[in-house]
Amino acid sequence: MTWQVALVAGAAPIPAEPALLARAEPVHRQLRPHLADDYAATMAGIFADGGEMIVAMNSAGDVAGVAVYRCFRNTFSGVRFYVDDLVVDVSQRSSGVGKAMLAWMRQEAARRGANGLQLESGTQRTQAHKFYFREGFVINAFSFKQDF
């Protein structure tokens, strides 16, 4: 199957497309069930902070995958293209959806001057890790967290 990747919300001043955002919500919640009930408002805040979103859809327009990412500069990476969320609908996994979204993001990252993609994945997500390794990702750092 061929997947079409579409921009839901991009870098300012590209606003979110409300209908597509609403169709993305159920898939996004498979990864982030804790998101506030007002998904559109939550995502508006993410977009205002520099987050952007793409979805992968089939020919009928059904959303099968969601990715949230941001592009910024830091002292370590220079131009950093960071993937906040990458989720494929559980019924569509291993069908090329994630691969299509990564291909789109690789192209966009290169267009913006980044030298790669970066992401974090919870230690419990072993199936996702297998996918990332197949796609050429490597573990290059530890991620530390302190709750307060």
Image: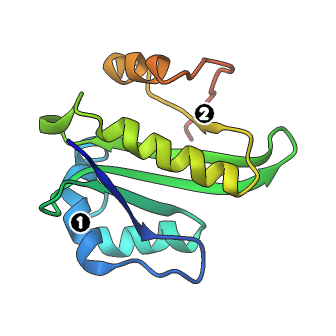
Q: Disc number at residue 146?
A: 2
Is residue 20 shown left or right of residue 107?
left
Q: Earlier in the sequence, mark 1 or mark 2?
A: 1
Rendered residue at 17%/58% (across/down): 59
Amino acid type shown at disc 2: Gln
Q: Pick the residue in front: 147 or 132.
A: 132
Q: CA distance from mark 1 to mark 2?
A: 26 Å
Secondary structure at numbered mark 1: loop
Q: Disc number at residue 37?
A: 1
Give the image quarter of residue 90. top left
Q: Position of residue 138 (x, y in %)?
A: 60, 18
Rendered residue at 60%/32% (across/down): 145
Rendered residue at 80%/40% (across/down): 77
Colour scheme employed for the rendering of this structure? rainbow
Give the image quarter of residue 60. bottom left
Badge 1 local density, few (<14 within 10 Å), some, or many (20+)? few
Of labels 1 and 2, the one closer to you: 1
Q: Pick the residue in front: 107 or 93.
A: 107
Residue 78 visible in the shown view: yes
